[in-house]
Image: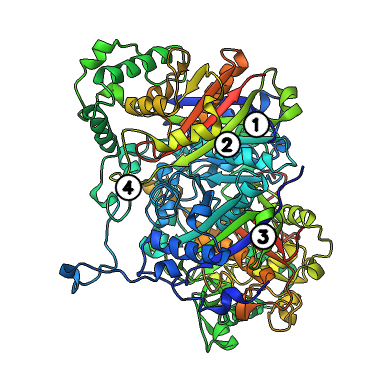
Amino acid sequence: MGAERTAVIGVGQTKYAAARRDVSIAGLLREAAYRALEMAERTWSDVDAVIIGKAPDFFEGVMMPEVYLAEALGAVGKPIMRVHTAGSVGGSTACVAASMVQSRVHRCVLTIGWEKQSESNAMWALSLPQPFATSVNAGAGGYFSPIIRRYMMMTGAPELIGCMVAHKDRRQALLNPYAHLHQHDLTFEQVVDSPMLWDPIRYSETCPSSDGACAMVLVDEASGDAHDGPVAWVHGTAMRSESNNYGGRNMVSPAASEQCADDVFAQAGIVDRRAEIDAVEMYVPFSWYEPMWLESLGFASVGEGWRMVESGATALDGGDLPVNCSGGVLSSNPIGASGMIRFAEAALQVMGAAGDRQVDGARRAMGHAYGGGAQYFAMWIVGSGKP
Amino acid sequence: MIDVAVVAFTQRQEAAISGESEVEFMVPLMEQAKASVGLTQSDMGFTCSGSSDFLAGQAFSFVMTIDGTGPVPPISESHVEQDGAWALYEAWVKIQCGGIDTAFVYGYGKSSPGSLRDVLATQMDPYYVCPLWPDSYAVEALAARLMLEGGHVSERRLAEIAARSRASAASNPHAVRSEPKSVDEILAEEHVLDPLRPSDLPAEADGGCAVVLAAGDRARELCERPAWIRGMDHRGDAHTLGVRDLTSSMSARLAAQHAGVADDKVDLAELYGPFTTSEHLLIEALGLDEDGTAINPSGGALAAHTMMASGLIRIGEAASRIWRGDGDRAVAHATSGPCLQQNLVCVLEGD
Amino acid sequence: MSADRPEARDPLAAPAALSAPVTLPEALAGAEPVESVCTPIRMAYTYTPGRALSRYLRAMADKRILGERCGATGQVFVPPRGVSPLAGAATSEVVELADTGYVESFNITRVPIERRPDLKPPYCSAWIVLDGASVGFLGLVINLAPEEVRIGMRVRAVWKPDEELETSAANILGWEPTGEPDEVITDYERIGRIEASDP
């Protein structure tokens, strides 16, 4: 007896914004949860368990917030769990939620990822002063830009590839009513001319800091079959982690990324990754990570990722492998939700429910998230048909 | 359900581990747990851990500790910001999905760098309660007063629980508080948080533990008498203190029902009751008979309270007694949140 | 399957369950809504660096840089954490490293950081791989215009004056070019060295 086939029948998102002052933390989660439950045609009482995920507790200053959220999430008398795997957490949380159904432990699970960064100071949370460490880096950009520089040296990618990714994602975000950034008149030249923050990363090539929550309802096979709304079937889930500190580590395409991808594609029975996947929601907090992940995930051979970007292959408009039709992390980044948004947007694509950002006829889509020093990975593949 | 057993367990608990970082003191525990069943990290189908950034005083603190597992080549891995018992639950679920037959689980925490009583206050509702900075132990004292004045428990009964913990802890090298005290001596202690006395409070500790899970035949290969997980469930109560009945534990009762505690006699129980009041409530909620069941033979969390690990340690303590033949059927329990808000119950059996 | 149903309604409309108006008691009818409250959290922690970092920091006071070696693979880690991720085991040997190395990669930061008001953008932060070490760590490249920093450039530590030395990594003010020929880097994907070199 293999794992139970698992279906996503509900997706709910909040409007992402720099500060959602109109709602409390609980209110933010409930907004996403209600939208997911409505789409799933379920109520709180149908939910067997709640699996939540977010990035560090210091971001809101609430320790183990599943404790405080019990009533708001209808979890009184029910199991509630809290996942935390760095930036990949939203994806990992979805994987854990899926495992609750795949294992036949539960039949209907509500999962939510969120961040309400406006309630604390993320810079403070990430750099609590420790007497024995020196600080020479401002934020994640300082960490990732040397890796991007390595990728550029390695592949000879033209300098403006990152700007092309950023411009594409910000334009695609205009099709997504939930996206944080809606820069209607942003031109490619403005992206290129935006201030250099962590050379070679420009301001417009970085993600914003957002408040937001994303929720999904996952159910077992019989419930998925019986559901008369759109359904996304889970074809594979995988998580991989590795150390970020050993000599000879591949920083550009970490082994954990490649092995996680191999695992999830094998589970889904996918051989020709570029041909068989119709849409990708990829975790791209800095623009250059799109070509880097295209290569690492096996959609392009080494050095060819930037050529895919350059050719327009990853654009919703005319590309054969649209990436981040939602606008991606570059357009909305509530950290603990960002991974789950990738997974949920992939589900919406194969449900045919992605609105104006829909890839026509999408049958199989990938959700991808990473975190830490590019060392934590979570991925899933969802399809319109059963696995 | 796939039969899964606890086959290895290591722990360390001390009043304060001041000279070593978390990963430094966890590495030997991780190595010994794996080595005790002849496995290495590459044999593990899944790895999961539990820890807390607020305890460590640092964001992403678990990223420092994962190096201790030896995650090169990469590992299939996840982390919960909960007690390690919930990490074990996640790993158990992962094994139920099929395809793997081993898992490695660990939990750890150091309370000594900060003030645990203050740190835990940040678990409370951030808008209405946390700004008042309630001392988290004082919140437990509120529950204790309700229990005492409502006639749900007597001060003597609480002293008996404290005395039993001290007596049992005497034979546990990992206990932090194990000096024997009689019930009368305990009743003669001055109240520290009226109506609670020092012996009613947990002995705070730093430390951690590591566990190996294995399924079916693999478990039988690795362990002479595996401690099979026959049932496991976790449930939560409401958070708002005014909404809950603090004199009983609905969620512990529910979890015990779903885990099947009452299906057969229980030889021993390891309960994560940080306070004597919580142990009393748990015995009631789980329906345990103290004449037939050895309660907290390790001394329990009263004797050594290691935040983020004490629940997983209860499972390890119960399992190791099954291995040794001290009993055939054991119950292990973990809790999280103020006043036993969340509870996990695990039933373990020998063949 | 009605594929377009979820988008049929306004995606930003409040969920039905949350759209019912809240009726306030009359006494609160004119009250200004509270959108946020400031509740500062202050907690004091006494950090312990651990055995390996303690050794490293003590040696820093003598202008020495200590790494630690993995017994299984020979790799040398700096700053040491007391553990080898390659072995899942404690490091087995303390190794003294040279205060010279090369730039493995770098970025030019053009934004100020809150905790280092002394650092005036633009400045160059780089991964420095010390001679004798397997992995790089972060440092500032100084005494050179950021635009002139190169991957592979040889650098040496610039220490604080002796009278200002503490048990702190801040004893190294930064890394300046040695003028030696660049380290030849052929593999841009991989960082550090699989084998530790001779210091």
- Residue furthest to the left in view is C27
Q: Outermost residue toward the right?
A: A271
- Determine which of the numbered discs, if any, sits on residue A226 in the image: 3
**Mark before the other along the chain sequence, 4 or 2:** 2
Chain-order first, disc 1 or disc 2: 2
- As measured in the structure, the alpha-carbon distance from the residue carrying label 2 to the one carrying label 3 is 33 Å
Q: Residue at 25% of width from left, 46% of height from top?
A: B133
Chain under callout 2: B
Which one is earlier in the sequence, the residue at label 1 or at label 4?
1
Helix, strand or loop at mark 4: loop
Q: Find the distance from the CA under tag 1 to the CA under tag 2.
A: 8 Å
**Residue type pointed to by label 3:** Ala
Residue named by callout 1: B213
CA–CA distance in space, label 4 to label 3: 37 Å
The picture places residue B189, in percent across and down from the top left corner, at 21, 18
CA separation, marks 1 and 4? Answer: 36 Å
Describe residue A310's horizontal placement relative to residue B131 as left or right: right
Image marks 4 and 3: residues in contact by CB distance under 8 Å:
no
Residue B88 tag number: 2
Helix, strand, or loop for circle 1?
A: strand
Q: How crowded is the residue under tag 2: few (<14 C-alpha within 10 Å), some, or many (20+)?
A: many
Cα gap from disc 4 to disc 2, whole angstroms: 27 Å
Identify the chain of the residue marked 3, using the numbered disc in the image.
A
Q: Is residue A123 above or below residue B137?
A: below
Q: Is residue A218 above or below residue B28?
A: below
Q: Nearer the viewer, mark 2 or mark 3?
A: 3
Left or right relative to A221: residue A14: left
Q: Is residue C162 above or below residue A355?
A: above
Looking at the rendered structure, which numbered label has been put on residue B240? Answer: 4
Does the CB distance between marks 1 and 2 fall below 8 Å?
Answer: yes
Q: Are marks 4 and 2 in contact (CB under 8 Å)?
A: no
